[in-house]
Image (tube, rainbow, N blue to C red):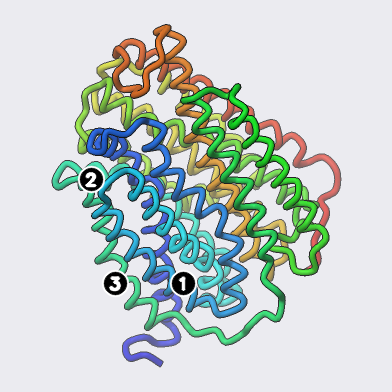
Amino acid sequence: MQQGITDASRKWWALAAVGSGTFMSTVDGSIVNIALTTIQRSFGATLGQVEWVILAYLLGIACLLPTMGRLGDMIGRKRVYVGGFVLFAVASLLCGIAWDINSLIAFRVAKAVGAAMIQSMGAALLVQAFPTSERGRALGYNATIISVGVASGPVIGGLLIEQFNWQSIFFVNLPVSVIGLIISQRALVDDTKRSTQRFDLVGAFSLGAALVAILYALTEGQHIGFNLPMIQGLFGVGLLGLLFFVWWELRTPAPMIDMSFFKVRDFSIGLIQTYMITLPQQFNYVLLPIFLQTVAGYDARTTGLTIIVVPIITTFLSSFSGRLSDKYGPNWIAPIGVVIWTIGLVLMSGIGDKPSLWDVAGRVAFIAVGITLFFTPINSSILGSLPKERTGIANGIMSVTRTMGQISGISIGALIWTWQVDTLSGTHYEIIAEAPHHILHQGYSNTMLVGAAICIAGLIPALFRLRGRNTTVAG
């Protein structure tokens, strides 16, 4: 036993180890949002290019989470987790010294590999550290850390950019990584159990290739046109890749994702809702910082302060939301969260072109309350729909779904705003920030209304939750 860590305190040290990695890797998925405008100007890049600074990271995580989960079963969870910390730190350093937009995107892919290693092991390591009677409690802590991490990114990024430069949002990961590594080495228990199953290389490759093809077509199509044969071909390749992936997973003896999980009604419907509601979340997280800096004239620090209400509300409301879900059930609390979230997006659509700090924060508060009231109950519903021994796998699939919602939201949100600006102005702007402010303002408002429509549509899958008998999966 390591000095200073007792059996009674080990679970809390393990929470600190996992929490530091999870928080850092989720923050990195949104911290760049606040720096997009600065990075775009620094490298003279287009909106489509800087989008890939975010997309490359999120897409890499989405593709690699199941792969890293299986790798952890084969060689040890602690080993994968610690290795992810090291890779994440090295890639952060490289991002900070990137010399052009292409090198930055490449180093973000390397960071995604490290982040996937960290995130795929987090829940499993907590379940391993906490007693069975506190498993739900441990996963609740993990869910809160993820929510706060995603929401805190723009706030932390704004403060760092204002005081230093955009490179600082990557360098700040270095001391956190060192501290996290020290705690992880001391607190996490080595697991010696190994899986005899083969690694599903075909499944991992087909899923990754399909997602890359679809997201690349969606992102580039908004700039060069969706009617081009190359773009349409990429969509076709992506769809065929997904169909092949499902076909392969149903037939291979060692699938990357067990398709029988999707026969469970609460599990499948919860994932559909998670994807649909996470998608418009990115409309606000990505487009609001660009709007405030290009139209409202905010600097990076002030922009970050307007979004600080999200992590504050999420932190204080998460436990209350969990208690409401335990008492009344997710079928009641999650829909209320969706309605409040939708109201927040409608309020954002009505924002003026020169809003005050308090005006923006007040509107964002509705979104924060909706986020918290939705995610805590729906996560509990998804994880509780499978046997306890499958909780780690369920968490991995849920993370992939949430990440795919983020990726789709970034691409679709930017697509709608660009399309609106081009339509309203009658001119195509290679750099959207060059459009007149009143056109950008109207385009942003219309995009938020589309996001509100997508959000409220997320209630539709819930109508099927209570219909029929829920299928179960054997442990």
- Circles 1 and 2 in contact, beta carbons < 8 Å: no
Numbered tag placed on residue 166 in the rendering: 2
Q: Quadrant of residue 215?
A: top right
Left or right of 369: which side holds 72? Answer: right
Q: Real-space Cα distance between discs 3 and 1?
A: 14 Å
- Circles 3 and 2 in contact, beta carbons < 8 Å: no
Left or right of 393: which side holds 406? Answer: left
- Asked which secondary structure carries label 3, the reply is helix
List x then y, in percent, for residue 442: 39, 13
Q: Quadrant of residue 36?
A: top left
Classify 423 as above or below 466: above
**Quadrant in which the N terminus appears:** bottom left
Rendered residue at 42%/41% (across/down)? 52
Rendered residue at 43%/63% (across/down)? 114
List x then y, in percent, for residue 363: 37, 27
**Label 2 neighbour load within 10 Å: few <14, some 14-19, many 20+:** many
**Quadrant in which the C terminus appears:** bottom right
Q: Real-space Cα distance between discs 3 and 2?
A: 23 Å
Residue bearing mark 1: 81
List x then y, in percent, for residue 207: 65, 52
**108 or 168, nearer to the observer:** 108
Sequence order check: which comes first, mark 3 or mark 1?
A: 1
**130 or 165, nearer to the observer:** 165
For badge 3, the amino acid type reads Ile
Q: Quadrant of residue 272?
A: top right
**Label 3 neighbour load within 10 Å: few <14, some 14-19, many 20+:** few
For badge 2, the amino acid type reads Trp
Residue bearing mark 3: 179
For badge 1, the amino acid type reads Tyr
Left or right of 410: which side holds 358? Answer: left
